Amino acid sequence: MNQDSPVQHQIYEDFRDQLMQLLQSVREGADRRQAAVTHPSHDRDRVASPATNLTVPTMTEGVANLQQMFRQQILTIPLEDIHPAHRIKVQSYQAEISKELRLVGLDCTFLTAARQAQTQGQRTQQVIDRLETLIRYCDGILHQLGQTVENPQERP
């Protein structure tokens, strides 16, 4: 077992938990949107204003919170505090997480601009895919830090 701090583990676990919560919210919004399109007679207002639109501000806020958490809590962990055997891989994961967070932010912007249900569905799926990727990166970091990952992300 390496000498990484329990605080490091907790920070990454908290970040992963936030990702999981946002992913769940996005999936629920996508499910509601799909139900509104599939069963328009159940709720005519949902067709005029798909559920995805209702979740976009929450989704965008969630992504902004994740970006802030990443910058303020994760990137401030000195790499010297990470066991030398794991430092390079953790740094690589951090670079990928930074990139994916920027891209998921752009996806939210594009989703906001999407007007057609098909485009909204595609953009929402892109956000879901990126969140799943971010969760896998967190799992990789936790593995590098010697942390057992609980509730591993289910593969679709």
Image (cartoon, rainbow, N blue to C red):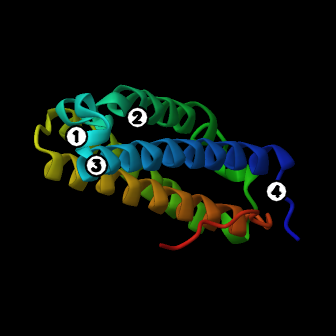
Q: How far from the left and from the top, in percent, is residue 99? A: 36, 51
Callout 3–callout 2 Cβ contact below 8 Å: no
Is 47 placed above or below 144 here?
above
Question: Mark 3 or 1, which is nearer the eye?
Answer: 3
Q: Which residue is mark 1?
A: 111
Q: Residue at x 85, y 67 (%)?
A: 2
Task: Pick whichever, 102 or 22, lies toward us.
Answer: 22
Three-letter amino acid code of the residue under disc 2: Met
Of discs 3 and 2, which sits in the foreground?
A: 3
Please name the amino acid that badge 3 sits on.
Answer: His
Can you give x and y, in whole percent of width and height, for residue 68 in the image?
A: 50, 30
Task: Identify the residue at image location x=67%, y=67%.
Answer: 152
Picture residue at 43% right of the left edge, 36% below the top: 63
**Which is more N-terminal, label 2 or label 1?**
2
Q: Position of residue 52 (x, y in %)?
A: 31, 38
Element under disc 4: loop
Tell me, yes or no, if residue 91 can be seen here: no
Left or right of 99? Residue 16 is right
Q: Is residue 4 visible?
A: yes
Residues at discs 3 and 1 in contact (Cβ within 8 Å):
no
What's the mark number on residue 39? 3
- Camera-nearest label, 2 or 4: 2
* In the displayed structure image, the side of residue 82 where residue 51 appears, left or right: left
